[in-house]
Amino acid sequence: MHSNVRTIDLTSETESSHQHGLVARADARPGFIDRWLASRVQRIIEPARVRLELWDGSSPYSAGLRPIGDLVVHDRSTLLGLIVNPDMQFGESYMAGRLDVRGALPAITAQLTRLSTLEPSWLDRARAALSTANTLRRSRQNVHHHYDLGNSFYERWLDRQMVYTCAYFAREEMSLEEAQYAKLDLVCRKLRLTPGESVIEAGCGWGSLALHMARHYGVKVTAFNISREQIAYARERAAREKLSGQVEFIDDDYRNVSGRFDAFVSVGMLEHVGKRNLSSVGAVLQRTLKRDSGRGLLHFIGRDVSRPLNAWIRRRIFPGAYTPTLAELTNSVLAPAGMSIIDVENLRLHYARTLAAWSARFGSASDYVRATYGDEFHRAWQLYLAGSEAAFHTGWLQLFQVVFTPRESSPPSWTRSDPFEARITPV
């Protein structure tokens, strides 16, 4: 397995201030301006029952109810940032250690998320207008930023099959391993795969779905990915499990897919395409799916209302990412490609539970992560996982599975209940 570790550069202007001693000392008493700024921030977050605490231990919190947790601010610049650009500065300050959270991070971020509106702000609109398309080169850079951190990093907190997408908890008592297996099989059943068919997979991760389809459903899979570490891992696993003859892992962009296939599947890639490139997915579907019998499935993080992804997440975690609405999927991808939607399922709460499991495992790997990547990286990923769990709990984000076929093709199943009848017992 490839487990190369690349250096993580998390330096920012605000962090430079922190490193050069411009952050207030613990014994420096807040002045009038600090207390005025703190009172403004407190008014914003007080409905969430979150208490703001300044670096001397004082707080403007005045609500009668006991707070669920505290935001501990260590300098004036953090107070200013929380007022002027909270989406970016909350993450930057927490990552740099200029803001601490006392209490359960997922619960506090969930309450703060509920205060937000899904309607895009003027800043969101400006960022959207200035955003650039994900070119072939930029897409590879974006994927490298997130997925080529070293396979050993992900092995520390994902399930045994290295599935880095929403699990499917078909039964309440399922473990993460069982739920990820159930998700892989649910995708196959929704597509009604049969032996001998050809499948194209766009964005295959570490290869778990491609290998599952080949092993249990007897199909031939061509899987595309532009993460070199993931591709190397997937190829080694295919060889080890004697499935190289059925699965081909290709180091290339989904836009370069060619040929005709019985089924198209993409799990967790659409949100990396970018708003300006959604039509390119439709072009791939139009030229690759068999018109008389083809069908496809898109599993992706989406929204109810169109707006850019959180600015800090785009900067630090998922550069170039965009979470589309179902309307955008229909208008920009499926309809232009001549596709009809057969089924839509929302697994939002399944993703919240998946993220809770990942966060717990990530916490167990904290010493390794800090030693290998540094404290700022650890805090960034800790916040990313907790914040994502909060976003799915509150409905800020959705997780859609959409099954579709060419308009002239028959639906892959006669009744909706058919794909939900599991046929395979996990091993």
Image (cartoon, helix red, strand yellow):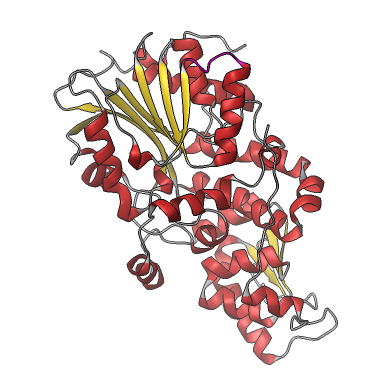
Depth check, front residue: 37 or 150: 150
Is 13 included in the stretch rendered in magenta?
no
| Residue 420 picture quarter | top left
Residue 203: where, in percent of width, then height?
Answer: 45, 36
Residue 142: where, in percent of width, then height?
Answer: 50, 53
Quarter of the image with the C terminus is: top right
Residue 209 located left or right of residue 386: left
Identity of the residue furthest to the bottom in this view: 32
Residue 26 located left or right of residue 252: right
Total labels: the figure holds 0
Residue 368 in the image: above or below residue 52: above
Residue depicted at 27% across the width and 25% down the height: 260
Depth check, front residue: 324 or 348: 324
Residue depicted at 61% across the width and 83% down the height: 37
Residue 29 in the image: above or below residue 423: below
Quarter of the image with the N terminus is: top right
Range of magenta residues: 241-245
Residue depicted at 24% across the width and 40% down the height: 283
| Residue 147 picture quarter | top right
Residue 125: where, in percent of width, then height?
Answer: 35, 68
Residue depicted at 37% across the width and 22% down the height: 199
Q: Main secondary structure of the magenta part?
A: loop
Residue 11 located left or right of residue 196: right
Task: Answer yes or no: is residue 172 visible.
Answer: no
Residue 392 in the image: above or below residue 241: below
Residue 323: where, in percent of width, then height?
Answer: 40, 50
Residue 171 located left or right of residue 188: right
